[in-house]
Amino acid sequence: MGAPDFARMPSLYIADGHHRSAAAARVYQARGGAGESGFFLSVIFPDNQLQILPYNRVLKDLNGLTAAQLLEKLAPTFIISSPGRPQPEAKHELGLYLEGRWHTLRFRPEISVVADPIEALDVTLLQKRVLAPIFGIDDPRTSQRVNSLAASEGRASWKDWSIIRNTPAPFPCSRPALRT
């Protein structure tokens, strides 16, 4: 595939490596495009050859809340269906495993419809609307109260945890730099 083929692509989605892409854009800007700073190694797959696995946030506690109190705190942010299903089926839909039951959480439209595509990502909405304000988790990468659980780990390992599950959608990259 050459440059003309690439230029004809209507969209390019970054499914993984968005931090690397953003860092490369910052290097390019800092160097004023000097040398080969406008290039970085990447691989491109057609969407029919790509599988994006769900990510799961495993909460070690409910931050002092009961299950009922948690659902009450989530209600202004989500349309909650109980019982729910373990596998989210659409953008802005999450699964919450709480006290042995699944709940389907759908971000309310007034929350999820925003102009900035980064702010519309489920992971951003989850962080800003749930993890930080309700659980006090400001940085899930460093917090001892939340972990990730691989999609391949069986349900038996979930029995004592509260889990927020999301199947991410690819993100359309229409800007040279993404905020991280």
Image (spheres, rainbow, N blue to C red):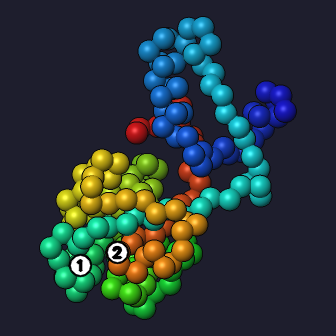
The C terminus sits in image quarter: top left
State which mark lies toward you, 1 or 2.
2
Q: Quadrant of residue 122?
A: bottom left
Instruction: Using the rendered image of the protein, determine whether residue 18 is visible from the camera's viewpoint.
Output: yes
Q: Position of residue 168 (x, y in %)?
A: 53, 60
Identify which residue is drawn at 66% across, 28% down.
Answer: 41
Q: Position of residue 153 (x, y in %)?
A: 54, 68
Crowding near pointer 2: few (<14 within 10 Å), some, many (20+)? Answer: many
Identify which residue is drawn at 30% across, 47% down.
Answer: 142
Label 2 belongs to which residue?
162
Crowding near pointer 1: few (<14 within 10 Å), some, many (20+)? Answer: some
Identify which amino acid the numbered label 2 is placed on. Ser
Q: Quadrant of residue 67?
A: bottom left
Whichever of labels 1 and 2 marks the residue nearer the N terminus, that label is 1
Label 1 belongs to which residue?
70
Q: Position of residue 120 (x, y in %)?
A: 43, 56
In this view, 60 is above or below 45: below
Identify which amino acid the numbered label 1 is placed on. Leu
| Mark 2: secondary structure | strand
Q: Position of residue 86 (x, y in %)?
A: 50, 80
| Mark 1: secondary structure | helix
Identify which residue is drawn at 48% across, 19% down.
Answer: 27
51 with respect to 111 (left or right): right
